[in-house]
Image: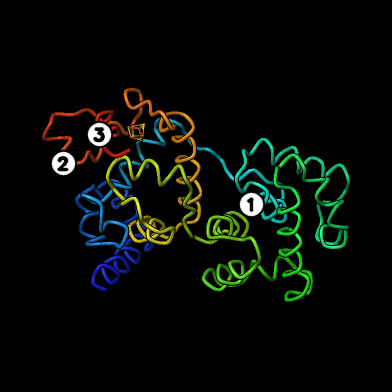
Amino acid sequence: MVHRVKSSLLYLCVLSGPLRPLWLKFCTPYAYCGCVTNPPAMKEAHHAPPLEAVYRALLREFGPQHWWPGRTRLEICVGAILTQNTAWTNVEHAIRNLRRARALNLTTLHTASLPQLAEWIRPAGCFNVKARRLRAFTGLVADRFGGSLDKLLALPAAELRATLLAVHGIGPETADSMVLYAAGQPVFVVDAYARRFLHRHGWVGARATYDEVAELFTACLPPDAQLFNEYHALIVALGKTFCRPRPLCDKCPLTGMGMRPEAKAEGGSCRRNVAMVC
Ligand code: SF4
């Protein structure tokens, strides 16, 4: 409760405009410890993550990422469903098929036969499952919002998220991708890359839930969709470049940040830290 009140006051200050640069400049890891006194995901972790310092380091390393790939809001929603358990390049092939068949519109996606829909999206893998999920999503738009995606995406963030989560095959990451990238509302998208680097640094426990990890970010950062957009994309870049299944800590901009106390006591490197955690 206390940390929520503190966070709200911090947001008010940050959002008031002139204080934003000061916050960005001086919000140190210690400031984070103050605003996230004991978030749920930290129960098993050793210390709070210096999320602003991490962001700055990643931005310096990779530069702005300009996400999300998608020409329209519908394409973003379709991509969010198709990218489940597959690489984005496969999604691009599937979306190209839909575009070539002039099927990348709500009417066609909702009325085409399921086998046809599955054939178009075949490159994305699990195409029969994903065809049913796409159909469930277009069914939501058609049945409850009169076929208007804009009406669905105009819902307040919490209501939109809950509405999407009630749809067959849409989980938290997919729902949040739609809320953030298609609706432009500030929710944080948590993926496997985020969990991996946070856990390796001892910033979240192995059993932290999706919502607990997301709250780490939303409790400490200003509710800024552009910031969350960029941060998520930078974490993906981190996961693909350095924090891979076999981590490249020596070259990583986050090396040495937030080492577990036992690793520090041993004078261990971040690599040693990773070996201890994983
Ligand atoms: S320093 Fe190592 S463990 Fe940390 S984010 Fe980089 S690669 Fe991952």
CB of mark 2 within 8 Å of CB of mark 1? no
Q: Which residue is mark 1?
A: 80
Q: Which residue is mark 2?
A: 261
* Mark 3 or mark 2, earlier in chain: 2
**Where is residue 7 drawn, in percent x and y?**
30, 65
Q: Is residue 99 left or right of residue 54?
A: right
Q: Amino acid at mark 2?
A: Pro
Q: Is residue 251 above or below residue 58?
A: above
- Farthest residue in the top direction? 250
Q: Which mark is residue 36?
A: none
**Where is residue 169 drawn, in percent x and y?**
64, 60
Q: Is residue 110 above or below residue 265?
A: below
Q: Amino acid at mark 1?
A: Ala
Residue nearest the viewer, comparing 118 with 146:
118
Residue nearest the viewer, comparing 44 with 58:
44
Ligand 1 image-quadrant field: top left
